[in-house]
Image: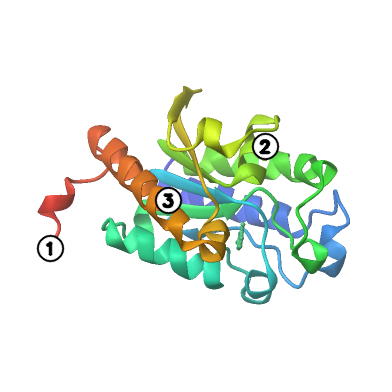
């Protein structure tokens, strides 16, 4: 697909997202929150669902969790085009509750379209909702965090949600370590230059 075709496909995808009414979350949402970062990024970061700030701005991870996520990405030299940030659900659940399994299911088709367009090499799932939404099964974070799984040509890692580190700063350390492993994997795959070569 050339650039022009890709941009057309992307516009179609955004239109599908904004006109989706497969669950009731859209009814109370201000915006459909699709992504921020690059459209062809080697790293896709998947969170849970938009909160109040994200709903207002129409972009994922722009509140306190987002600031933490951003500082971790910056500390490993990621630029905006290196990552594509999105969520399991594109509309804000009322009172920031966890999305229901039926809402996650309803949004899955759009997320699958997003993966096909972005074609990341590495996927970072932030938190248990992202894991459960992606793999369709419940999990104990301690059992899966920080390890790569290779599936369908993707390298997938699960880590703590940044909100978890905001509640207890000791979780900053494993999240920081996991970002380092992600950076290393992208370098090994030839998607990013070695960090020491970045000024
Ligand atoms: N938490 C999420 O999981 N996603 C956001 O976009 C913001 C906060």
Q: Secondary structure at mark 3?
A: helix
Q: Residue 106 appears at what percent x and percent y?
A: 80, 43
Mark 2 Cα within 10 Å, few/some/many (few <14, many 20+)? some
The quarter of the image that holds ligand 1 is bottom right
Q: Secondary structure at mark 1?
A: loop
Query: How far apart in space, not on screen, are marks 1 and 2 (Cα)?
Result: 38 Å
Mark 3 Cα within 10 Å, few/some/many (few <14, many 20+)? many
Residue pictured at 63% horizontal, 70% vertical: 54
Query: How far apart in space, not on screen, are marks 2 and 3 (Cα)?
Result: 19 Å
Query: Is 158 in front, or is 40?
Result: 158
What residue would you read off at disc 3? 175
What residue would you read off at disc 2? 132
* The N terminus sits in image quarter: top left
Q: Residue 65 appears at what percent x and percent y?
A: 53, 65
Q: Earlier in the sequence, mark 2 or mark 3?
A: 2
Task: Indicate whether 190 appears above or below 8.
Answer: above
Q: Secondary structure at mark 2?
A: helix
In the image, taking residue 10 as reference, residue 92 lies left or right, namely right
Mark 1 Cα within 10 Å, few/some/many (few <14, many 20+)? few
In the image, taking residue 60 as reference, residue 21 lies left or right, namely right
What residue would you read off at disc 1? 199
For discs 3 and 1, the disc positioned in front in the rendered view: 3
In the image, taking residue 197 as reference, residue 156 lies left or right, namely right
Task: Report whether the residue tagged 2 is closer than 8 Å to ligand 1.
Answer: no
- Quarter holding residue 138: top right
């Amino acid at each position: 697909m050339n650039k022009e075709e890709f941009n057309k496909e992307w516009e179609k995808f955004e239109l599908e997202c904004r006109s989706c009414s497969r669950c009731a979350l859209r009814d109370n949402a201000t915006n459909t929150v699709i992504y921020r970062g690059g459209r062809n990024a080697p790293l896709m970061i998947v969170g849970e669902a938009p909160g109040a700030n994200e709903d207002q701005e129409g972009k994922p991870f722009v509140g306190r969790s987002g600031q933490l996520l951003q500082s971790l990405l910056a500390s490993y030299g990621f630029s905006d085009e290196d990552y594509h940030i999105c969520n399991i659900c594109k509309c804000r659940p009322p009172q920031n509750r966890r999305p229901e399994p039926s809402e996650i299911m309803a949004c899955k088709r759009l997320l699958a379209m997003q993966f096909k367009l972005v074609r990341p090499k590495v996927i970072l799932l932030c938190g248990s909702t992202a894991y459960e939404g992606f793999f369709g099964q419940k999990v104990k974070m301690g059992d899966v965090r920080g390890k790569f799984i290779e599936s369908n040509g993707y390298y997938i890692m699960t880590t703590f949600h940044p909100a978890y580190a905001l509640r207890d700063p000791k979780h900053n350390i494993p999240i920081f370590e996991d970002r380092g492993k992600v950076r290393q994997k992208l370098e090994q795959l030839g998607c990013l230059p070695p960090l020491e070569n970045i000024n």
